[in-house]
Amino acid sequence: MKLVNLKIANKNFKSRLIVGTGKYKNMQECAKAIKISGAEIVTVAVRRVNISDKSKPLLMDYIDPKKIMYLPNTAGCFTSKDALRTLRLAREIGGWKIVKLEVLGDKKNLFPDMIETLKSTEVLTKEGFKVMVYCNDDPLMCKRLENSGASAIMPLAAPIGSGLGIQNKTNIKILRHQTKVPLIIDAGIGQASDAVEAMEMGCDAVLINTAIAKAKDPFQMAEAMKFAVISGRKSFLSGRIIPSYQGSSSSPKRGLI
Amino acid sequence: MNKKNKIKIVVNGKLLTVNAKFSLKNLIEKLKTPISKVAIELNEEIIDKRKLKKIFLKNKDKVEIVHFIGGG
């Protein structure tokens, strides 16, 4: 199989690694890690401008939205109303149409509220948004999201920021089988091997924030994740050998002394 | 200027006293907000940034000015 671009809402991307811009020590560190990761899409949050401290640096001064696509995210929203409000504001900042919807349902484990998520997807799609949706791994709900016009299905592999790796392989495999739009692992990646695994399972991309931002050396981890995603994708496309419980020697028997 | 010519508004949760006949454009200028990098809401309604000059604030108006920050 040929190496092809990731296509989301008719836009092409060479990199299959999407990274978050939160949790870094400072903007410089964030910008450098993103550059090393090779990501072409970064998630961003919508928050109040600090009106009392105007000297605070702006994200746009460090990460140029003309060079890297900003993916506005509704992280922190617990209702459809708040999520819709946030994304409408994001669109107003500069015409962003491709957005990431995240409606949380539980403050402790940050699992999504799928009823609110589905409602929001329907409304946003009708308003012309291209919605990439953070969701749980339930194949039925994911199908409903896809049928509602979601531009990407983004199931969690484990709770957001947990770094537990892929805890739901069976469901992710079922989702891979049924999903026609990009399938992107959105949460739970902890180390490079998790990203490889997600890509080897045939996922179209992975989204990573905490695993890079909170690594002791975020720059090295950003590079590790970049190669992990490339490696996993190539491995998936290569067509792996059939596993066997018998040994099969790599050297020919002929000519053995 | 006496109190009559002043109004109280809430911007990003903070109480501000400004002159009556204060437009949203005046507010953005006062706060030195980079207009191309923000979105503005007045009483939970998104405002077209091209019309800021024509929108005058009233007492108790609630303004939200948001931008992008780092997030997951």
Image (tube, coloured by chain):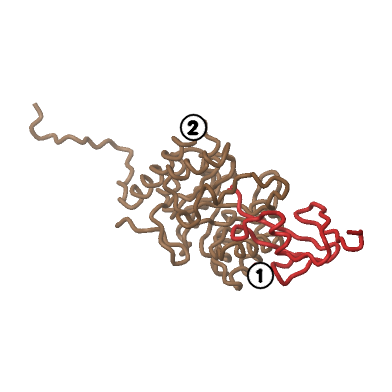
Chain colours: A brown, B red
Q: Nearer the viewer, residue B53 or A117?
A: B53
Numbered mark located on residue A60 in the image: none
Q: Residue furthest top?
A: A257
Label 1 element class? loop
Tag count in the figure?
Answer: 2
Q: Would you call the spot at circle 2 few (<14 residues within 10 Å), some (14-19), or many (20 or more)?
A: few
Image spot of residue A74 (x, y percent): 63, 56
Label 2 element class? loop
Left or right, residue A128 beside residue A228: right
**Residue A59 sits above or below residue A248 on the image:** below
Q: Would you call the spot at circle 1 few (<14 residues within 10 Å), some (14-19), or many (20 or more)?
A: few
At x 82%, y 53%, the residue is B15
Q: Nearer the viewer, residue A174 or A21?
A: A21
Image spot of residue A68 (x, y percent): 47, 54
Q: Nearer the viewer, residue A245 or A85?
A: A85
Question: Which residue is label 1 attached to?
Answer: B48
Residue type for callout 1: Asp
Confirm or deny contact between disc 2 and disc 1 (CB under 8 A).
no
Task: Give the Cα distance between marks 2 and 1.
Answer: 43 Å
| Chain under disc 2 | A
Residue type for callout 2: Asp
At x 40%, y 42%, the residue is A228
Rendered image quadrant of residue A143: bottom right
| Chain under disc 1 | B
Rendered image quadrant of residue A113: bottom right
Image spot of residue A148 (x, y percent): 57, 69
Image spot of residue A151 (x, y percent): 51, 64
Question: Which residue is label 2 attached to?
Answer: A217
Q: Residue furthest front?
A: B1
